[in-house]
Every structure is written in C-alpha cells, then in structure tokens.
Image (tube, rainbow, N blue to C red):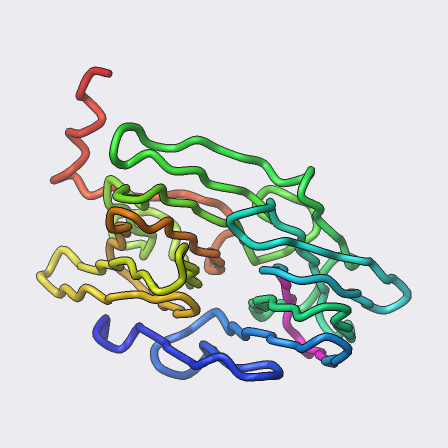
Amino acid sequence: MLTDTLHRVPRAAGRQLLVKRGADGSRELTAWRLHLPAGATDDYVAPNEETIIVLQDGRGIFAAGDHSWIVGRSGVFADRATALYLPPNTPLRVTATTDLEAVLVSAETAEGGKPAIVRSEDVRVNARGRGDYARDVHDIFVTDPHARRLMVGETFNPPGNWSSYPPHKHDGKNGEPVLEEIYYYRVDPPQGFGHQMQYSADGECVTHVVRDGDAVLLPYGYHPVSAPPGYRLYYLWAIAGAERRLALYEDPTHKWIHEIAD
C-alpha cells in the first residue's frame, strides 16, 4: 500500500535501519543511515548484497578490504557526492574524523566487482526539465561497470520547483522495466519540508509531507516531488530491479507539457 511508504526514523548515533527488503512492501532494497560523532567507527558487511554508501556530510575514512580512502563533504547542498561501491561480502569500516553522516543502500546479487570510489569530480551532472520543473540530477553509480544491480544518484530541486516530472513510473505495467526505488530527503533550511506524491492509474493516491532525514519507498506507480517556496529539496535515489537500466514511463495525461515552447 502506498500509504505505508513513508519511513521517518529520528537521528541517533550509529547505523539506523530506514527500509528493509522483505518488510513494509520492499522487495529489492535495504537502506541505512549512518550517523557518527568524531572519533567513532562503524563496521558493516552485507553477505550476498552489493552496497553503495553515499557520504552526506563530514570527514572520515572508508576502509574496504585492502583499500582505504579519506573522504569529505561539507554537505549535500555544498559539494557533489563522494560514494563507495562495495561488492557482496566485503567488510567496510567507517571512521569519522569529524561528525559524519552517510546513507547506505543495498540489493541482493550473487556477484560484484571490486570496491570502487566515486569522487565529486566523477559525478555526472544533468540539467532536467525547464521553468518551474527544472532541477539538477547527479549520476553517481548509474552506467558504471562496478555495480551489478544498483543505480544511485541525487536530485536537487530549487525552491518552488517540481521534479520526477512529468510524473513517471517504472513498475512494468506498461512494458517498462520493473524497478523499485527509495528516495532519501534533505531540506535546506532543515526545518522545511517537501511533498512526495504517489499514485497509480487505478486511482490509488497518497501525498507524504517529507522532512529532512525521511525516506520514502517507491514500490510502484507515479511519484512526482515538489519543493515549497523558500526551501531547497534534495533526495538521494537508489534503484534496483529486473534490469540495470533507467527506463521510465511518463503519465500520458501530463506529457503534453513537453510540447510547450520555450
């Protein structure tokens, strides 16, 4: 049910489960938030799952297998992402040198490549939409050779703008690949909010008020997003499903907006 797709977990020290595959309608994805004070460490391993960890803010060390990387990000609205790909069964140790926050997403796979880091200069920036549905979409792990099933990126809405618009879906009901998705939200200033709408052609519909640190599962249906005036909206998106390919089906009712001249 789309009414059960909002996951609001208060921040606390350590690694917090946001969405778990096999529970609350999730078939493909698990997501965690890692929140560490300076000097703290966290050890993580996911048997039979590949994982991507996306740094949100702070500085620290990502150590995976025989590899170690110093990482840092002043914040999602200040810097492009730094992210690490972990193949299945690969131990990860995160050591925070300042207060640090990151998001981990995983999906089942029998095999994977080697650990791989994406730095801010490696992120591909795409300008999407126009006018009041213009936004920037950052590809982190999307067309890379490392991940087997996961696709991960970030979307940035200016104040007052919409994204995932015209509304699209990827649940396979119109021939597109069956893909499950999670959005993880940040808001600037952080006391603000956004709106996450989800609806299907058969009339099911829900709109969530999303706040900084919320996660929303997108199991099926169309899922447009809006930011109110005065607040920038960010969401990390993670996708897994039948194919590792971004192929979307836009709602025919609203595709006419493409025909408006600039």
**Span of residues in magenta:** 43-53
- Magenta region, mostly helix, strand or loop? strand
Residue 103 is situated, as x and y percent measured from the top left of the image, at: 57, 67
Residue at x-position 67% and y-position 69%: 110
Nearer to me, 187 or 234? 187
> In the visual, does 169 lie left or right of 22?
left
Residue at x-position 29% and y-position 48%: 230
Task: Name, please, the residue furthest toward the top.
Answer: 261
Number of marks in picture: 0
Q: Is residue 45 magenta?
A: yes
Q: Is residue 174 above or below residue 102?
A: above
Looking at the rendering, in which quadrant would you find the N terminus?
bottom left
Residue at x-position 72% and y-position 75%: 38
Task: Name, please, the residue furthest toward the right.
Answer: 66
Nearer to me, 35 or 74? 74
Residue 101 shows up from this direction: yes
Residue at x-position 31% and y-position 65%: 210
> In the visual, does 117 lie left or right of 106?
right
Residue 115 is situated, as x and y percent measured from the top left of the image, at: 78, 59
Q: Quadrant of residue 19?
A: bottom left
Residue 195 is situated, as x and y percent measured from the top left of the image, at: 25, 58
Nearer to me, 243 or 34? 34
Residue 92 shows up from this direction: no
Looking at the rendering, in which quadrant would you find the C terminus?
top left
Q: Is residue 218 magenta?
A: no
Residue 75 is situated, as x and y percent measured from the top left of the image, at: 57, 55
Nearer to me, 104 or 203? 104
Q: Is residue 113 above or below residue 40?
A: above
Q: Quadrant of residue 84?
A: bottom right
> In the visual, does 36 lie left or right of 197?
right
